[in-house]
Image (tube, rainbow, N blue to C red):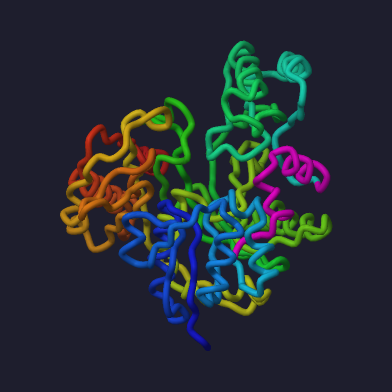
Amino acid sequence: MKKMKVLIVGAGGREHALAWKLSQSKLVEKLYCAPGNGGIAELAECVALRVDDIEGIVAWAKKEGIDLVVIGPELPLTLGLADELEKAGIKAFGPRAKAAEIEGSKVFAKGLLKKYGIPTARYGVFEEAVKAREFIRELPGPWVVKADGLAAGKGVFICTTHQEAEEAVGDLMSGDVLGAAGKKVVVEEYLEGEELSILAFCDGKTIVPMVPSQDHKRAYDGDEGPNTGGMGAYTPVPVASPELMKEIEEKILKPVITAMEKEGRTYQGVLYPGLMLTKEGPKVLEFNCRFGDPETQVVLPRLESDLGEIILAVVEGRLGDVEIKWKNEACITVIMASGGYPGSYEKGYAIEGLAEAATEGNGVLVFHSGTKRCEGKLLTDGGRVLAVTACAGDLPEAREYAYRAVERITFKDRQYRKDIAYRALKP
């Protein structure tokens, strides 16, 4: 099989993990990343293109003879990058714009779930704050208020009082918090239980779940503080039994793919439903149309098969012919963030100790999320800076290696949670 020139689109820890795994593929001849970051630059040639520059990415890929583009973030997917690449005759891994709307619009996703009887929370959709507040008063609390559009993990508010919920509605619909993304809101019942992340490869007909993981969205220990894009993750998840995984596949994954096909939105790429394990069974919280971040940083290290082969099979509609194997090990990632994240924070601080961190165990990997290189130095360049990952025979051992590596890495005002995987490890 011909070796490929591959472009990864994105700049975060997810894309660094993808670059790391694809660099091991026997099908990949040369890796590029647009725009990349300080860590990705060690594995791929970085190209100064914004992820939302659809025209620029397509033109550059054509000029360079790129065989395959792997699209990391949701924004270029919802803007139609996969569609435009396909028109240009370039293979694209990621759903087309109509299919990516499953993440791009919470309203569309909830409507799809309701129409096809796929389990989710009770909800209402509103374009007027007055009606949203009336619904809040009728629905028993707590409440979850969500912006309809893309919000980089910051458009969800969990509210315990009427006042909090009504203020969240007002903040979103005013446009002051998220602009146009919050002009339409979803208000839904709060679901109790444990969250579970299921990333799955899908070629439009066949859907194959990856190993389950669980992430930590709140900023501080004990799931306190504001929601973030994710402060850490781990796999395996003890509650995700083979029986539960089968139920998720039969009641959620397969029905969603069938529903999207019926709606004329054939889904190819990675589908990632965030699930809540309630007393009534698993229910969908939301959908993501791409690899999760930081889930990718723990799932891909467990992948034994060639990621390049899997991605090509997805794009060519023959996923059912590929055997996907996983390592029987545990993996944990701890996000090291800039002080103040997810609020305002400073950038440009020197990062030290990466070489020392890598010596803390054979399975230690450091994926860069928000870094840049400047005059030979590695500097912080985002809210989430590094995803410090460790793999081992079991979760306690992986956790020990991960935190020992974290302690070796320093930058001004660093912050991180000290309790990643606590649910799995509680007595």
Q: Is residue 179 above or below residue 163?
A: below
Camera-nearest residue between 350 and 313 = 350
Q: Which residues are magenta?
A: 93-116
- Residue 35 in picture, x, y percent from top left: 44, 56
- Residue 286 in picture, x, y percent from top left: 64, 42
Q: Is residue 282 above or below residue 14?
A: above
101 part of magenta stretch: yes
Q: Which quadrant would the C terminus be assigned to in this image?
A: top left
Residue drawn at (65%, 46%), measured in percent from left and top? Answer: 103
Residue drawn at (34%, 67%), measured in percent from left and top? Answer: 43
Task: Report the number of discs.
Answer: 0
**Residue farthest to the bottom?**
1
Camera-nearest residue between 80 and 65 = 65
- Residue 45 in picture, x, y percent from top left: 38, 67
Q: Is residue 213 left or right of residue 97?
A: left
- Residue 318 in picture, x, y percent from top left: 66, 77
Camera-nearest residue between 370 and 65 = 65
Camera-nearest residue between 202 and 210 = 202
Q: Is residue 53 left or right of residue 330?
A: right
Q: Quadrant of residue 425?
A: top left
Residue drawn at (67%, 52%), measured in percent from left and top? Answer: 100
Q: Is residue 3 above or below residue 128?
A: below
* Main SS category, magenta section: helix
**Residue farthest to the top?**
163
Q: Is residue 208 above or below residue 424?
A: below
Residue drawn at (57%, 25%), measured in percent from left and top? Answer: 177
Q: Quadrant of residue 96?
A: bottom right
Q: Is residue 423 left or right of residue 162?
A: left
